[in-house]
Image (cartoon, grey):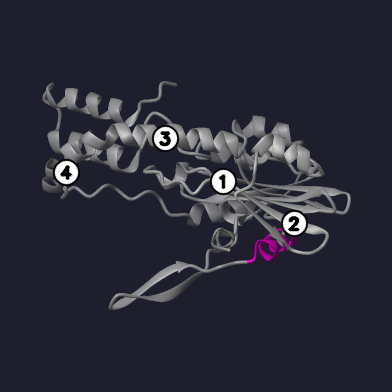
Amino acid sequence: MRTLSPTGIIQHLLSLCGKGRNIPAVFTAALLASSCGAQPEKSSPNTAVTVDSFLGLERAMALEEVRTALKMPGMHEFAALIGDTEYLCLHFLFQEPRVGFYLLFTNAHLKAIVGPPAPAFERIPYKDTFREIPKPFDPEVRLQNVLATSDLTRDEIKQEIARAPTASRTPSNIEPAVLIALPFFIARSGKIESDYRTNEELAKKYDPFKIRLGADMAEITDQFGQPYRVLEQSRETMTYVYGSPISLRINPSYRFSWVTVVVNNGKVVRVLSNHFFDRRLLDK
């Protein structure tokens, strides 16, 4: 499937205007493409799962069988070595309706399908009012909560899908702002395109799937290079933070994830990313 860059999207949309197409609609799409970095001809991460393929999953299926059935690898959340058992949690999302599930694997076989933890927020003073920000969490507590969550039945999964919200329509009253702002977004579309390329490079460099449970420091360094930050939890346990603080003007759903690697007695026992990465580690 062909993927258009933000610049290509705008050029294509401008050509449509010359063909008598609906100008407000065309410029609205151009604004969204440029400002958000949207890529209409490419699904955003983990949005290609169909309801039918998901409901057809059977427990004890091998990891690669699940990925083949869903036609995608899933988004990494955590990998954990507990005793002799290897756990892997992958996040799969639907584009419509907007709902997602965690698939929990033990020793590379599907054990359970569970709902992601509900996000928690806290109110903080902001100017003359308040704003809500994500509440800090302990990744290990969140991980253990997921492991303890009951497996959803097929009927429960259907109910969650039925309750999920659908995408809202784009407002139709933004034409003046679009017409005024479009030249600015066209001018910066090249920079946005460059940020997407940088983000793709960082996502490949810090791909959490590259780190194997049980690996030693030499293997980690070979895959990720030097850590951004190192924290000593105890004499036996070290936490390594990998990623880059670079600022990117891209759609947040595409942004690469920071990765936490926890090493106990010289071996990897946790790989945490996305919703299990504790951003407080960046401030220590």
The tag earlier along the polypeptide, 2 or 4, is 4
Labels 2 and 4 touching (C-beta < 8 A): no
| Residue behind mark 1 | 243
For residue 238, the mark is 2
Disc 3: CA contacts within 10 A as few (<14), some (14-19) or many (>=20): many
Could you tell me the amino acid type at mark 2?
A: Met
Check the picture and name the quadrant holding the N terminus.
top left
Residues marked 1 and 3 touching at CB (< 8 Å)? no
Q: Which residue is mark 4?
A: 181
Magenta residue span: 138-148
Compared across the picture, whether 265 is left or right of 151 comes to right
Q: CA distance from mark 2 to mark 4?
A: 49 Å
In this picture, is 273 found above or below 46?
below
- The quadrant the C terminus occupies is bottom right
Instruction: Give the residue type that dot 4 points to.
Output: Ala
Residue at image coords 13%, 21%: 19
Q: Is residue 159 above or below residue 209?
A: below
